[in-house]
């Protein structure tokens, strides 16, 4: 844990593409973003939290989120939750990343021997960091939607996935910090871990009633948007996850529609951000 957390540093944001509708009243919004690291009596978990504090992870995420115009304040931080989770809490306007979630990403990576064999230690760090930043962008979407009252249709969970992909693909250099491919890998690994065919009917009902798309649907959704945005760059990923040809041919149109929606609904909140 120590080795991984110490390497979970930030990345450079590509601010060159911040063009879109001019904001009006949003220019006056001055919500502040504050980092936090909570205290727990569990010494092992406290050690993890101290590692994140040492690596200034929440500080970097808060500075990054400060690159968005927010109507109200927001806080971002790490805590122990007793479950592998990351979430936005609307009542307290907090993005919470549980140390157990980071542990889960590490476990899933270690279990993927094929990938582990391809990545040296520094690249493993970059990979895990990519998943964490992808999840953070998803939670940031929930926060922006709630705090700024962004209109949307369909499931907010899908919109948050769309925002996370769109922002990563358009505003963050994949050479400096890959986010999209590690995110796709993570959803697929979780889908393989939670085999739907082995579930009881009660468990299946529970999963189908959830507001999130299924892990495998999230894998295919993000892959499809990636393919739509970057047909040549995403071809090997589409093959790796087994995206069907019938979905693949529609991906350019699907991404164009997503891009249009994201630009019209979110660009006005971007003021430019850097994690440095
Ligand atoms: Zn969510």
Image (cartoon, helix red, strand yellow):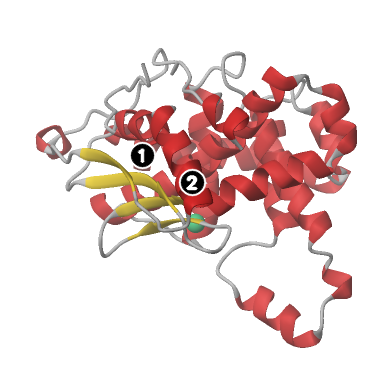
For the residues marked 2 and 1, what is the alpha-carbon distance in whole angstroms?
A: 13 Å
Q: Which residue is mark 1?
A: 266
- Mark 2 or 1: in front is 2
Which quadrant of the rendered structure holds the C terminus?
top left
The residue at which mark 2 appears reads as: 138
- Does the beta carbon at disc 1 come under 8 Å from ligand 1? no
Q: State left or right for residue 161 relative to residue 123.
A: left
Residue 250 seen in the current view? no
Q: Is residue 61 above or below residue 45?
A: above
Is residue 239 found left or right of 167 in the rendered image? right
The x, y position of residue 143, in whole percent, is 34, 50
In front: 176, or 212?
176
Q: In this rendering, does residue 29 appear at all?
A: yes
Identify the image quadrant of residue 235: top right
- Which residue is located at x 17 percent, y 46 percent? 71
Whole-percent x, y for residue 9 in the image: 49, 23
């Amino acid at each position: 844990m120590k080795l991984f957390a110490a390497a979970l540093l930030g990345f450079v944001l590509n601010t060159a593409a911040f063009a879109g509708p001019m904001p009006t009243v949003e220019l006056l919004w001055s919500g502040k973003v504050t980092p936090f690291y909570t205290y727990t009596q569990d010494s092992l978990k406290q050690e993890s939290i101290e590692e994140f504090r040492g690596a200034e992870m929440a500080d970097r995420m808060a500075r990054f989120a400060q690159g968005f115009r927010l109507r109200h304040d927001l806080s971002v931080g790490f805590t122990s939750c007793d479950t592998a989770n990351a979430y936005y809490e609307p009542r307290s306007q907090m993005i919470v990343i549980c140390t157990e979630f980071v542990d889960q990403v590490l476990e899933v990576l270690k279990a993927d021997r094929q990938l582990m064999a391809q990545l040296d230690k520094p690249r493993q760090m970059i990979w895990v960091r990519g998943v964490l930043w992808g999840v953070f962008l998803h939670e940031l979407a929930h926060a922006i939607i709630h705090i700024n009252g962004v209109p949307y249709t369909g499931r907010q969970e899908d919109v948050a996935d769309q925002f996370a992909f769109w922002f990563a693909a358009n505003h963050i250099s994949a050479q400096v910090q890959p986010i999209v491919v590690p995110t796709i890998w993570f959803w697929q690994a979780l889908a393989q871990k939670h085999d739907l065919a082995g579930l009881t009917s009660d468990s299946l009902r529970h999963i189908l009633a959830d507001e999130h798309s299924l892990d495998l649907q999230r894998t295919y959704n993000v892959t499809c948007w990636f393919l739509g945005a970057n047909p040549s760059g995403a071809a090997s990923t589409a093959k790796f996850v087994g995206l069907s040809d019938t979905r693949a041919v529609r991906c350019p149109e699907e991404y164009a529609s997503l891009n249009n929606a994201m630009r019209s609904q979110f660009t006005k909140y971007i003021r430019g951000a850097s994690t440095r």
